[in-house]
Image (cartoon, rainbow, N blue to C red):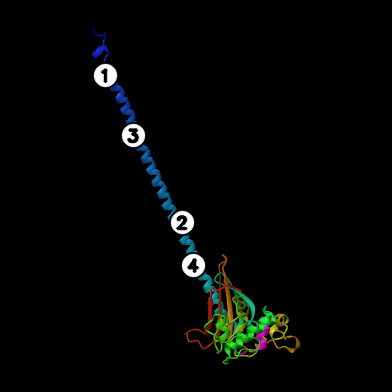
Amino acid sequence: MAAAGGRLAAGGQPERRGGVVNVARARGGRHARQGRRARTGAALLLVLWLITLLTALVGGFALASRIEALQGRVLVSGLVAGNAARAGIEYAMTRVDQTDPRLQWRPDGQPYTWRYGGAEVEVRIIDENGKVDLNQADMNLLTELLRVLGSDQVEAARLAAAILDWRDTDPLTQAAGGAEDADYAAAGRAYGAKDAQFESIAELEQVLGFTPEIYARIEPHVTVFSGMQRPDSAFASAAVLDAMGLDGELLVDQRRQVDPVTGQPLPGAGGQDLVGSRSGTYSIDSRARLADGRETVLRAVVRSGGSAVPGMAYTVLRWEEGVTPR
């Protein structure tokens, strides 16, 4: 007998088909919602990744642009400083040739400063006659110069002898040591002594016994352009004056003292004439410094007149740019 309001399934159990369907639908709806949430989460994750990627790209472009801008500013600053240093060379040549002593820059190594295009320029001029000529100086002068610059007596004599052996044409080693071809070969240097005059002071770096440190000390005080056996004391540095047996510090101090009326340096003590005859060949160090700290140093050896370049009032004998200031 059927129960009231229902049907009996086989075995006498009430039929629950509708309930099963409802449960299945409920489960299906839950799975569908979970699927939609999963798809929504994946889409959100993808969007976040895209945002991160775009942010990285934009940041990379911004950083690259900033770096390029900084590089541009550095390049421009370098050009400005370089041009100011070159202007220092040009200006120095006009001032050193001034006939009015009050306006004239003396080529004795003292610093002169002026401003050009927003840069502070410091210029030092040295007449090459105030330096020790590597091709003309004798053993004693070379030895004393090296000793004054920091070498002991034995090393100074040996290095001076090596300079003489480099420039002389004979195969005989100097009594103080020196260095001829056999000595260079023993030191692993195949080129040997030059047996000819120095064409450049840079050749000193090839002379046996000269280290970079010794070369750096002697380089500002030697030349190959004067042709003089002894330097002109009116333009020589304190070290060169000391090597000549004079009181370098005293003489340098005296020649910086000028007559306020004539602009001429006052006479030195002991009859030492501090007004020399200029050679027209000068070493010029020009250092330009910008307000942002950028600095360029230009070092040149120039000779007045006789330039092969049209419009140039001097001939360049040596040119170093971007060097470290001394």
Q: Between residues 44 and 176, which one lies in front from this camera angle?
A: 176
Q: Which residue is mark 3?
A: 35
Residue corresponding to mark 1: 17
Q: Secondary structure at mark 2?
A: helix
Residue farthest bottom in this picture = 170
Q: Amino acid at mark 4?
A: Leu
Residue receiving disc 4: 75
Residue 63's disc number:
2
Using the rendered view, name the quadrant where residue 135 is placed: bottom right
Q: Nearer the viewer, mark 3 or mark 1?
A: 1
Q: Earlier in the sequence, mark 2 or mark 3?
A: 3
Residue flagged by tag 2: what amino acid is it?
Answer: Leu
Q: Nearer the viewer, mark 4 or mark 3?
A: 3
Cα separation between marks 1 and 2: 69 Å
Label 4 to label 3, Cα distance in Å? 59 Å
Disc 1 to disc 4, how far (Cα)? 86 Å
Range of residues picked out in magenta: 136-144
Image position, residue 291 (x, y; %) = 57, 66
Amino acid on which the number 1 mark rests in the picture: Arg
